[in-house]
Structure formats: C-alpha cells, structure tokens
Image: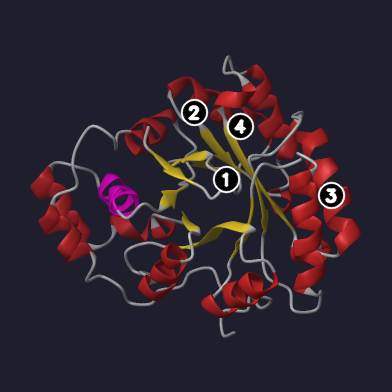
C-alpha cells in the first residue's frame, strides 16, 4: 500500500474501499474480506445507511483499529453546529469505534452557514472524535470560502474524478493548498471499461481498464475509493502497487477528459 500525508501528519492510504450501495451482510463480508486482503481504508457515509454493516465488518476483522483508516460523511441537511456534534457521536456508535480518521461534509449546503459547520468540525476534531476533517463535492469557490474561515482545517476534498472528468484546475488548487483529493466513482460507474482508448492501453500493457484508471489517479497522488462487490474485483483493484505507471499511458489518459460528470443531483452546487 502507498500513502499520502495529510496536514495532521497522518498517512491516508491511496486506495480504499468505497461502500456506496453496499448494505447488510454483503457489506460486512466485503469489508472483512477487503481488510484481510490488505486494504487499510474504508469509506462510508451516513447517507449510505450502512454504518452498522461496516462496523460489523470492522469488528470481525483481525486488524487492529489503529491499522484501518475510516472515513464517513455528514448529510448536507445535518450541517448545523449542534447537528454535526450529535451526528458524529452517532456515527461512532453505529460503527462501533472510538474515533474516525476522517469526517467530511458530504455536500455543500448554502442554506446553512459554513462558518457554523466548520466551527463544529474543528471542535469534534479537537475532542478526538475524528483525527481529520474535510469536505466532499466542493468546487474551488467553496474551498476558497472555507479557507477564508479556517485556513488550516480542511484536509481532504472528495469529488467525482476519473479520466473522462479530469478536474485539473480543482486538483491543482487542492495541491497548492495542501488539500488531498479523493476520487469517488473512479471507474466512471463502469464507463472506463467501454473506453476504446483505455481498452487499447490495457491490452498494450497487459492490465485491466480498471487497473489503469486507478493507477492513473494514484500516480497523481489522488486517493481512489472504488466500490467492489466481489473478491475478484477486490483483488484486481488492489494490484496497483508493484508496477510503475507507463509515461505513455499517462499522456494518453490525460487527454480523455470530456467533462463527463455522472453524479449531479439537483441539490449539488457545481455551478458555484
């Protein structure tokens, strides 16, 4: 496993297991299998409604709590000061853990003062309920607002990022401000398997399209959190750290952006 260092000095694994749409026994088993396989990073959210299942998988794992990086996210309607404090404690109870490694605002919400939200996040961090805090689905403008309020607080921005949504300006802004970017939907909901360009590169370098797409991200120090619901996909996605990303493949994949945003709900603020 390779890592990226956060502002706190904590090391965040560059590959994690995304658990969106994983529920119940299946979710618990996938979490447990992934940890046994070598994964050290589990990504969940209150909105996924699977905290208890993730917690069961963690509990059944042989790994020590300190050896697993756990991320969760707060719903946009729960960003008021007291709501953040109350919900963070609930997350920990549901996950059966004493602290989170990373707590994120899941979506920006202009109806609730960001100052209020960041104050609460700073306090739950100070109280040791989470080691790091960050945001998700924030644009450059959202990040600028947050940095004006508290320049040192935001450690991570989790966004949709894949070869056909290469948000280069956002990546550069995050890097300039010591904010780690995490890519959700790193396989573009399966569309990387349909890309003729990626298929051609995969054949040339004897890798799967998924491995190339994930390696393209990790090569840029972007954390990738693909969802996997089979042991085969878990193993394939994990096989990223014993080979170098070919420069020619990087050059070709950097050209594939079509601004192909796949996750764009009505409450999203991507135009901000």
Give the mark nearest the N terminus, 4 or 3: 4
- Which residue was labeled with disc 1? 8
The spot of residue 244 in percent (x, y) is: 18, 42
* Secondary structure at numbered mark 2: helix
Q: Which residues are magenta?
A: 209-219
Q: Is residue 263 magenta?
A: no
Image quarter of the N terminus: top left
Judged left or right of residue 232, residue 194 is: left
Marks 1, 4: nearer the viewer: 1
- Which residue was labeled with disc 3? 87
Report if the CB atoms under discs 1 and 4 are less than 8 Å apart. no
Report if the CB atoms under discs 1 and 3 are less than 8 Å apart. no
Judged left or right of residue 217, residue 89 is: right
**Any mark on residue 26, and which?**
4
Q: CA distance from mark 4 to mark 3?
A: 25 Å
Marks 4, 2: nearer the viewer: 2
Give the mark nearest the N terminus, 4 or 2: 4
Give the mark nearest the N terminus, 1 or 2: 1
Report which quarter residue 110 is drawn in.
bottom right
* Secondary structure at numbered mark 1: loop
- Which residue was labeled with disc 2? 34
Q: CA distance from mark 1 to mark 4?
A: 34 Å
- Residue depicted at 25% across the width and 70% down the height: 256
- Residue depicted at 89% across the width and 49% down the height: 86
- Residue depicted at 58% across the width and 70% down the height: 138
Q: CA distance from mark 4 to mark 2?
A: 12 Å
């Amino acid at each position: 496993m390779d890592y990226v260092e956060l502002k706190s000095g904590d090391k965040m694994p560059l590959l994690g297991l995304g658990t969106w749409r994983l529920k119940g026994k299946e979710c618990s088993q996938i979490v447990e299998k992934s940890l046994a396989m070598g994964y050290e990073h589990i990504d969940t959210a209150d909105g996924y409604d699977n905290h208890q299942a993730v917690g069961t998988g963690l509990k059944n794992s042989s790994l020590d709590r300190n050896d697993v990086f756990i991320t969760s996210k707060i719903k946009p309607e729960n960003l008021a000061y007291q709501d953040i404090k109350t919900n963070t404690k609930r997350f920990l109870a549901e996950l059966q853990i004493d602290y989170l490694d990373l707590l994120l605002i899941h979506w920006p919400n202009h109806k609730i003062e960001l100052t209020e939200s960041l104050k609460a996040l700073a306090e739950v961090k100070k109280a040791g309920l989470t080691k790091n805090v960050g945001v998700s689905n924030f644009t450059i403008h959202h990040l600028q607002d947050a940095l004006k309020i508290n320049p040192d607080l935001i450690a991570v921005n989790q966004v949709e990022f894949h070869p056909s949504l290469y948000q280069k300006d956002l990546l550069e802004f995050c890097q300039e401000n010591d904010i780690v970017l995490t890519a959700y939907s790193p396989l573009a909901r399966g569309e990387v398997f349909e890309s003729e360009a990626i298929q051609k590169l995969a054949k040339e370098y004897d890798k799967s399209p998924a491995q190339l797409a994930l390696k393209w991200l990790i090569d840029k120090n972007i954390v990738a959190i693909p969802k996997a619901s089979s042991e085969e996909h878990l193993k394939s996605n994990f096989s990223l750290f014993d080979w170098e990303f070919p420069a020619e493949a990087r050059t070709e994949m950097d050209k594939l952006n079509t601004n192909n945003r796949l996750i764009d709900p009505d409450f999203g603020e991507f135009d901000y």
